[in-house]
């Protein structure tokens, strides 16, 4: 009877350990813009945030414990190198140890990304780590994997001009940001705070430029008459124009704002706000009304009006 109870307790402990897995967080050991074929080290941190202790196996060769996904902005996954593939096709002993993490305890491992991929590539990629608590052995290894956060990897040719690189990264960063479900007032709040911090990629994230440009006196007529390729060029011009901080534009730099009213139905919304601007030695206060439409279950700003506060 005692043996049966002991067996059940051990089984429960094992289940508890696996039902409360560690979190996996990755970051570059030396964050920067990397060059083609440069060594890229990544720190992988395992953390146990639960009350129960956590135990797993850790291979001496970290390729048995960690794998990586390397995905382009076009959502195309980079294939592992031939050396990595051949490594797993060899018959060889796998040396390992048992790692135990108590509550709030963590441990960091340093891994070379070049051990997984040929780094004779250029562009921007999303990197994610896959942790194998029981090591990457056998057909059941994928059943207990734990995935990490994502980080952005920038690789440029060795002779690239640094200024051009920074401009390209700023443009590519806009593609990486992912829209979240936000209420109309939260969308306006997000947009205004991004502008106050000069975070342009975030500022444009919830603005439907295709809709807004049609109401613009300077760009609207040209945009409507242009073909699709030309429209993309005009949109780029429009974005650069908005970055010039023109008075009464949606992108005019605010110093403070206050959202005062929000109205919305199933597909349309309206947000009224007082927006304050610094004009030489005084603060000017304007009344903005932002109009939003719901697209794919997410709100985007499609137009706006601005007036003096004395009119409200």
Image (cartoon, rainbow, N blue to C red):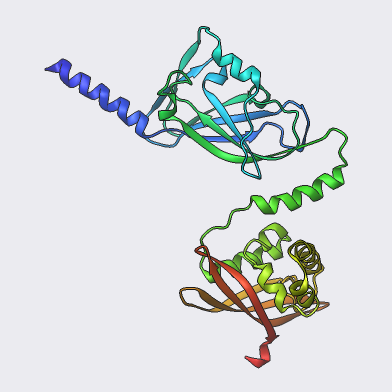
Q: Position of residue 198 (x, y in %)?
A: 74, 61
**Foreground of the two, 42 or 118:** 118
Lateral position of residue 9 relative to residue 77, left or right: left
Decide which of 69, 273 is in the foreground and name it: 69
Residue 167 placed where, x, y %?
81, 50
The x, y position of residue 277, in whole percent, is 74, 76
Image-quadrant location for residue 10: top left
Left or right: 263 in relation to 203: left
Q: Residue at x 74, y 81 (%)?
A: 284
Check the image and report above or below for 153 versus 141: below
Q: Nearer the viewer, residue 273 or 147?
A: 147
**Relative to residue 154, is residue 63 drawn left or right?**
left
Residue 199 seen in the figure: no
* Quarter of the picture holding the C terminus: bottom right
In this view, 217 is above or below 192: below
**Residue 59: x %, y % from top left:** 51, 16
Q: Residue at x 51, y 61 (%)?
A: 181
Could you tell me if residue 84 is visible in this image?
yes
Name the residue nearer the viewer: 224 or 278: 224
Depicted 18 relative to depicted 168: above or below: above
Q: Quadrant of the N terminus?
A: top left
């Amino acid at each position: 009877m005692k043996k049966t109870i002991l067996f059940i307790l051990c089984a429960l402990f094992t289940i508890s350990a696996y039902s409360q897995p560690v979190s996996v967080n990755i970051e570059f050991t030396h964050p920067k813009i990397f060059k083609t074929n440069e060594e890229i080290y990544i720190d992988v941190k395992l953390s146990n945030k639960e009350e129960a202790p956590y135990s797993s196996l850790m291979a001496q060769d970290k390729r048995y414990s960690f794998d990586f996904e390397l995905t382009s902005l076009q959502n195309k996954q980079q294939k592992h190198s031939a050396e990595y593939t051949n490594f797993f096709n060899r018959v060889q002993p796998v040396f390992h140890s048992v790692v135990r993490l108590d509550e709030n305890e963590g441990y960091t491992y340093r891994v070379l990304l070049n051990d997984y991929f040929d780094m004779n590539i250029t562009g921007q990629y999303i990197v994610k780590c896959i942790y194998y608590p029981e090591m990457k052995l056998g057909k059941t290894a994928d059943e207990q994997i734990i995935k990490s956060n994502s980080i952005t990897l920038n690789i440029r040719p060795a002779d690239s001009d640094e200024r051009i690189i920074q401009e390209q990264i700023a443009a590519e960063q806009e593609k990486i940001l992912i829209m979240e479900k936000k209420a109309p007032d939260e969308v306006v709040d997000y947009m205004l705070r991004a502008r106050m911090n000069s975070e342009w990629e975030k500022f444009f994230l919830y603005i439907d430029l295709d809709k807004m440009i049609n109401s613009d006196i300077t760009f609207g007529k040209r945009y409507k008459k242009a073909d699709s390729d030309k429209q993309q060029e005009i949109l780029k011009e429009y974005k650069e124009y908005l970055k010039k901080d023109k008075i009464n534009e949606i992108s005019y730099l605010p110093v403070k704002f206050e959202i005062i009213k929000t109205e919305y139905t199933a597909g349309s919304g309206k947000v009224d706000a007082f927006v304050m601007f610094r004009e030489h030695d005084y603060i000017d206060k304007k009344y903005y009304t932002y109009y939003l439409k719901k697209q794919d279950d997410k709100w985007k700003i499609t137009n706006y009006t601005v007036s003096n506060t004395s009119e409200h």
